[in-house]
């Protein structure tokens, strides 16, 4: 045993304890002795025994009655009790078992038999304890999953509904104005409403594309292979395209060395797209956004940093789909899908994604991918 087991012996004869103590010497047990049945119940909480050796014949409350009282307490029902008895008839042994005893040993006690029975009962106790831990872990896991499902359902109802409804309202509103007032509108007004509808449609398309990406990633199980390895050469140009969409190209800087990564080009594209979009979308204009790569074999590290409002530790722990983060400083909100997509795509290929963020000071996202030795 790696740790000592606590054994409580209840016997009105101290010399019997001396015998047991001698027979169990050098066995890594903590032995405790109580000479009165009335004191035994009081000592249980303090001693926390893993096994109880209980003499049957004692004055006042005998061992059988004490066994019955101990087993009546829920917190001690799993603690095995070995009855130490001079009784030999089947009826006497039946009374011990009926009282809740788990085993018995006859007097005079023999060392080999005592040690074997003690080891057997302690093994059963340990197995029961492991089952309790497993059951508790299972119950905790179920509670966490239920809470996560409730949270997801709530976010799906509120966040996703809002995110889908907003661009749809822009599309329908713009088209409705055109439908009802086209004849009286100037060319400039018509263009304004067409642009509103088009921009809203693009926003809706982008959200639907994110949902499709997230759904695809949740259904995939990737086995990385060299045939799908992506080159890092396109990362800088792809980041520039995304920054330019938000008029932030002048804020983007950094460099990415050439490397061959164990990830499909499509998934690497998704990751860069989502992380750069978050950086330029959720940080103020005219503040730096950097994208830097480095190789430390067997890993390729990609760092994307911004000086936005940042995330709290609680928000970081909740990174996942449909978790909406408030960015009031820059009047932006997000579904959290971008980070969820990047994290899931990275992990599918055996990579790692980490967030280092300080509220009010910005965020750095680091993704690591496995790379080939000759990439250095």
Image (tube, helix red, strand yellow):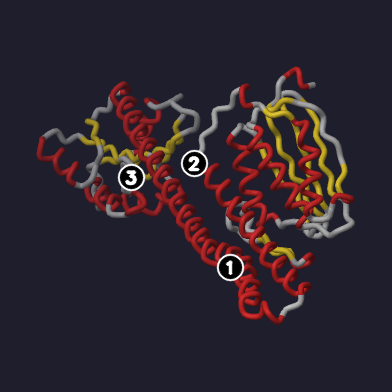
Reply above or below: 322 against 111.
below
Separation of residues labelled 1 and 3 (CA atoms): 57 Å
User: Which marked residue is nearer to the observer: mark 1 or mark 3?
Assistant: 1
Q: Quadrant of residue 228?
A: top right
Q: Which residue is mark 1?
A: 165
* First-in-chain label (3 vs 2): 3
Quadrant housing the C terminus = top right
Q: Residue shown at 73%/28% (left/top)?
A: 231
Q: Tag 2: Cα neighbours inside 10 Å, few (<14), some, or many (≥20)?
A: few
Q: Is residue 351 left or right of residue 219?
A: right
* First-in-chain label (1 vs 3): 3
* First-in-chain label (1 vs 2): 1
**Residue 207 in the image, given as x and y percentages of width and height:** 61, 56
The label number, if any, that marks residue 219 in the structure image: 2
Q: Nearer the viewer, residue 6 or 247?
A: 247
Q: Tag 3: Cα neighbours inside 10 Å, few (<14), some, or many (≥20)?
A: some
Separation of residues labelled 1 and 2 (CA atoms): 26 Å
Residue reaching furthest top? 374
**Residue 8 visible in the displayed image:** no
The label number, if any, that marks residue 78 in the structure image: 3
Q: Residue shown at 53%/43% (left/top)?
A: 216
Element on which disc 3 rests = loop
């Amino acid at each position: 045993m790696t740790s000592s087991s606590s054994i409580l012996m209840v016997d009105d004869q101290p010399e019997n304890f001396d015998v047991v103590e001698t027979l169990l010497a050098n066995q890594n047990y903590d032995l405790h002795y109580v000479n009165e049945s009335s004191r035994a119940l009081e000592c249980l909480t303090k001693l926390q025994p893993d096994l109880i050796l209980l003499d049957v014949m004692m004055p006042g409350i005998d061992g059988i009655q004490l066994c019955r009282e101990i087993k009546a307490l829920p917190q001690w029902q799993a603690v095995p009790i070995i009855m130490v008895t001079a009784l030999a008839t089947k009826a006497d042994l039946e009374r011990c078992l009926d009282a809740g005893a788990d085993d018995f040993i006859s007097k005079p006690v023999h060392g080999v038999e005592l040690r074997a029975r003690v080891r057997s009962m302690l093994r059963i106790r340990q197995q029961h304890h492991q089952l309790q831990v497993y059951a508790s872990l299972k119950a905790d896991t179920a509670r966490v999953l239920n809470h996560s499902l409730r949270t997801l359902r709530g976010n799906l109802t509120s966040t996703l509904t809002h995110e889908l409804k907003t661009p749809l309202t822009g599309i329908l509103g713009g088209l409705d104005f055109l439908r009802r007032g086209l004849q009286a509108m100037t060319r400039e007004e018509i263009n304004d409403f067409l642009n509103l509808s088009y921009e809203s449609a693009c926003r809706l398309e982008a959200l639907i594309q994110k949902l499709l990406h997230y759904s695809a990633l949740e259904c995939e199980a990737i086995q990385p292979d060299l045939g799908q390895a992506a080159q890092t050469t396109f990362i800088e140009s792809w980041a520039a395209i995304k920054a330019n969409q938000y008029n932030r190209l002048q804020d983007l800087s950094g460099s990415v060395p050439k490397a061959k990564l164990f990830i499909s080009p499509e998934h690497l594209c998704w990751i860069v797209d989502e992380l750069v979009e978050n950086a330029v979308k959720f940080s103020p204009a005219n503040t730096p956004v950097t994208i830097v790569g480095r190789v430390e074999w067997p890993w390729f590290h990609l760092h994307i940093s911004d000086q936005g409002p940042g995330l709290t530790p609680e928000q970081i722990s909740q990174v996942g789909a449909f978790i909406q983060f408030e960015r009031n400083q820059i009047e932006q909100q997000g579904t959290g899908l971008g980070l969820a997509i990047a994290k899931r795509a990275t992990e599918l290929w055996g990579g790692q994604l980490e967030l280092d963020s300080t509220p009010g000071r910005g965020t750095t996202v680091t993704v690591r991918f496995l790379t080939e030795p000759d990439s250095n």
